[in-house]
Image (cartoon, rainbow, N blue to C red):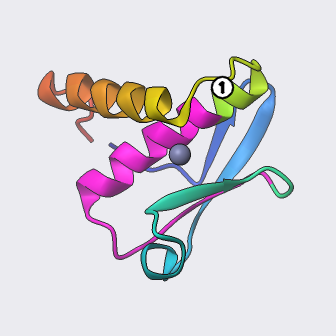
Amino acid sequence: MIIPKTIKIGSHVFTIESKPNLISDRDRYAEVNYRTNEITIDPSATKQQVEESLIHEIIEIIDGHCEMRLSHQTIKTLGFSFYQVLQDNNLLRE
Ligand SMILES: [Zn+2]
């Protein structure tokens, strides 16, 4: 997967930034800031963790934007499952 510098989700453009210590300080590989429209990802995460986390954050943004009110467990399952299908079918090639 190519990690872009920006990504458009719905009508919003989010920047994707590297943010050290998310894993140690916040117990997560990535997070979204809706005030600044930033997706931050810990640079020490593995390639798989980065890719899976970006898909997870995209689903969270869509969930919020569309007011679907999915549980976090559902978002995690969708993210994990989408990542598996994309990865195992070679759809994330660079
Ligand atoms: Zn989440």
Q: What stretch is highlighted in magenta?
A: 37-60
Packing grade of label 1 (10 A; few <14, some 14-19, many >=20) is some
* Helix, strand or loop at mark 1: helix
Locate the N terminus by quadrant: top left
Whether residue 31 is visible here, answered yes or no, is yes
Q: Where is residue 80 in the image (x, y as percent from the top left)?
A: 31, 34
Q: Is residue 5 above or below residue 68?
A: below
**Can you tell which quarter of the image residue 9 is in?**
top right
79 with respect to 89 (left or right): right
**Can you tell which quarter of the image residue 10 is in?**
top right
40 with respect to 21 (left or right): right
Number of numbered tags placed on the structure image: 1
- Residue 45 forms part of the magenta stretch: yes
Q: Where is residue 88 in the image (x, y as percent from the top left)?
A: 13, 27
63 with respect to 86 (left or right): right
Judging depth in this view, the residue of 73 and 86 nearest the camera is 73
Q: Position of residue 15 (x, y in %)?
A: 68, 54
Whether residue 2 is visible here, answered yes or no, is no
Q: Residue at x 77, y 26 (%)?
A: 65
- Residue 50 forms part of the magenta stretch: yes
Q: Which residue is drawn at 41% across and 73% down?
A: 43
Tag 1 residue = 63
Q: In this view, does 68 lie above or below 48?
A: above
Locate the C terminus by quadrant: top left
Q: What residue type is labelled 1?
A: Asp
The yes-or-no answer for disc 1 within 8 Å of ligand 1 is no
Judging depth in this view, the residue of 69 and 83 nearest the camera is 69
Q: Which residue is drawn at 46% across and 71% down?
A: 42
Q: Position of residue 91 (x, y in %)?
A: 24, 25
Q: Which residue is drawn at 68% across and 23% down?
A: 69
**Can you tell which quarter of the image residue 67 is in?**
top right
66 with respect to 47 (left or right): right
